[in-house]
């Protein structure tokens, strides 16, 4: 069995290009957008943006980002968890839950206790302490999507 670990791109800048290509392959967002956001997380003292990966040995098996706004009309609700993805072979193993909790804890340590997340999923994020907050219109989308929030107590692990 492969050992899984969660890493921050800001701690492993050598993975930036590989991570950007991986996210681009999952979501179809231009590679340059991921590279630009990851470059910002490497060269800024700000908590946002941040990018995280779950690695199984040397393979990316999951990941997500934290950005100001995940391309929706509620610009006041920030920052947003975005691009959440776990490889199909690693689903139903708790990978997403561990990744989400790691990110919430990390953001809380940096003074950000509330995060938002735009999704079409129902029921999935509730398992991990996220609460439905409102509907939001995604940029270029025909119908609104669900916007969730998660509030973490700083210092809680």
Image (cartoon, helix red, strand yellow):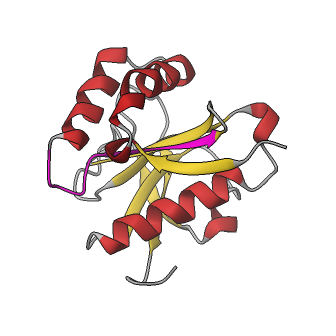
Nearer to the camera, 24 or 71: 24
Q: Say whether residue 149 is visible.
A: no
Q: Say whether residue 117 is visible.
A: yes
Residue 105 occupies quadrant: bottom left
Q: Position of residue 32 (x, y in %)?
A: 29, 17
Q: Is residue 13 magenta?
A: no
Q: Position of residue 10 (x, y in %)?
A: 32, 45
> With 130 as the anchor, is 18 left or right in this view?
left
Q: Which residue is at 80% across, 52% downward?
A: 93
Q: Which residue is at 82% across, 49% downward?
A: 92
Q: Give the residues drawn in magenta, as a range.
A: 44-55
Locate the N terminus and report the quarter of the image it occupies.
top right
Q: Which residue is at 23% across, 40% downward?
A: 42
> What residue occupies the far right of the structure in this picture?
1
Q: Position of residue 151 (x, y in %)?
A: 43, 75
Q: Is residue 77 above or below residue 28?
A: below
Q: Position of residue 80 (x, y in %)?
A: 36, 52
Nearer to the camera, 134 or 80: 80
> With 1 as the anchor, is 94 left or right in this view?
left
């Amino acid at each position: 069995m492969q050992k899984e670990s969660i890493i921050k791109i800001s701690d492993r800048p050598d993975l930036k290009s590989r991570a950007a290509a991986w996210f681009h392959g999952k979501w179809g967002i231009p590679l340059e957008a991921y590279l630009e956001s990851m470059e910002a997380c490497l060269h800024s003292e700000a908590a946002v943006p941040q990018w995280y990966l779950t690695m199984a040995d040397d393979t990316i098996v999951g990941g997500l980002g934290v950005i100001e706004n995940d391309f929706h009309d509620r610009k006041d609700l920030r920052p947003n968890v975005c691009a959440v993805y776990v490889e199909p072979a690693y689903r139903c193993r708790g990978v997403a839950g561990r990744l989400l909790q790691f990110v919430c804890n990390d953001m809380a340590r940096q003074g950000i206790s509330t995060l938002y997340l735009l999704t079409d999923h129902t029921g999935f994020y509730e398992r991990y302490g996220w609460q439905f907050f409102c509907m939001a219109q995604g940029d270029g989308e025909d119908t609104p999507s669900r916007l969730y929030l998660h509030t973490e107590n700083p210092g809680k692990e």
